[in-house]
Image (spheres, helix red, strand yellow):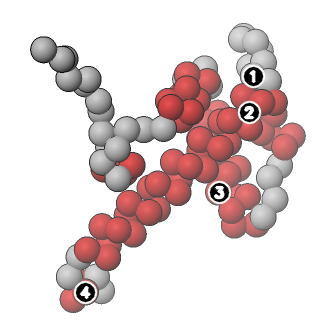
């Protein structure tokens, strides 16, 4: 008999598995303190609103004195993961909003 593969599915991913690259980026994200991650998210939001990313701040937030530096490639991966998750959150909330009764939206 074949064993069923235990797969985690997420509504925000359309009831599919999370992308492998995103799961791999979570290991890099786990090396960053929650305060620094929050500051990185603010930079991503600023980029969305203003159209410019402050690379000096991003490098500062991904460089930790007590640990080794996160390289540029990993930093780009972190930013991509933050962008992707932000897009998923927006899409999921919009989908839930559109499913609600129009009379309850106001």
- Residue, far left: 1
Discs 4, 1 touching: Cβ within 8 Å? no
* Residue sitting at x 61%, y 24%: 28
Residue 74 x %, y %: 72, 28
**Residue 54 vertical placement versus 57 (above, below):** below
Residue beneath label 4, please?
102
Residue beneath label 1, please?
70
Closer to the camera in the image, 19 or 84 = 19
Front label number (3 vs 1)? 1
Q: Is residue 1 left or right of residue 24?
A: left
Residue beneath label 3, please?
45
**Distance Cα–Cα, label 3 vs label 2:** 16 Å
* Residue sitting at x 60%, y 36%: 37
**Residue 2 vertical placement versus 54 (above, below):** above
**Helix, strand or loop under label 3:** helix
* Residue sitting at x 21%, y 89%: 103
The reply to whether residue 61 is visible in this rendering is: no
Among the two numbered marks 2 and 4 on one chain, the one whose residue lies closer to the N terminus: 2
Among the two numbered marks 3 and 2 on one chain, the one whose residue lies closer to the N terminus: 3
Residue 96 location, quadrant: bottom left
**Distance Cα–Cα, label 1 vs label 2:** 6 Å
Residue beneath label 2, please?
75
Q: Residues within 10 Å of mark 1 (few under 14, many from 20)?
A: some
**Distance Cα–Cα, label 4 vs label 1:** 46 Å
Discs 3, 1 touching: Cβ within 8 Å? no
Residue 101 location, quadrant: bottom left
Discs 1, 2 touching: Cβ within 8 Å? yes
Front label number (3 vs 4)? 4
Front label number (3 vs 2)? 2
Among the two numbered marks 3 and 4 on one chain, the one whose residue lies closer to the N terminus: 3
**Distance Cα–Cα, label 2 vs label 4:** 41 Å
């Amino acid at each position: 008999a074949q064993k069923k593969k235990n797969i985690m599915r997420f509504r925000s991913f359309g009831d599919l598995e999370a992308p492998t690259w995103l799961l791999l980026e979570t290991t890099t994200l786990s090396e960053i303190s929650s305060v620094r991650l929050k500051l990185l998210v603010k930079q991503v939001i600023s980029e969305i609103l203003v159209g410019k990313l402050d690379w000096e701040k991003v490098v500062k937030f991904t460089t930790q004195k007590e640990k080794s530096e996160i390289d540029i490639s990993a930093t780009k991966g972190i930013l991509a993961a933050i962008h992707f998750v932000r897009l998923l959150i927006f899409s999921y909330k919009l989908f839930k909003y559109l499913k609600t009764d129009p009379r309850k939206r106001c």
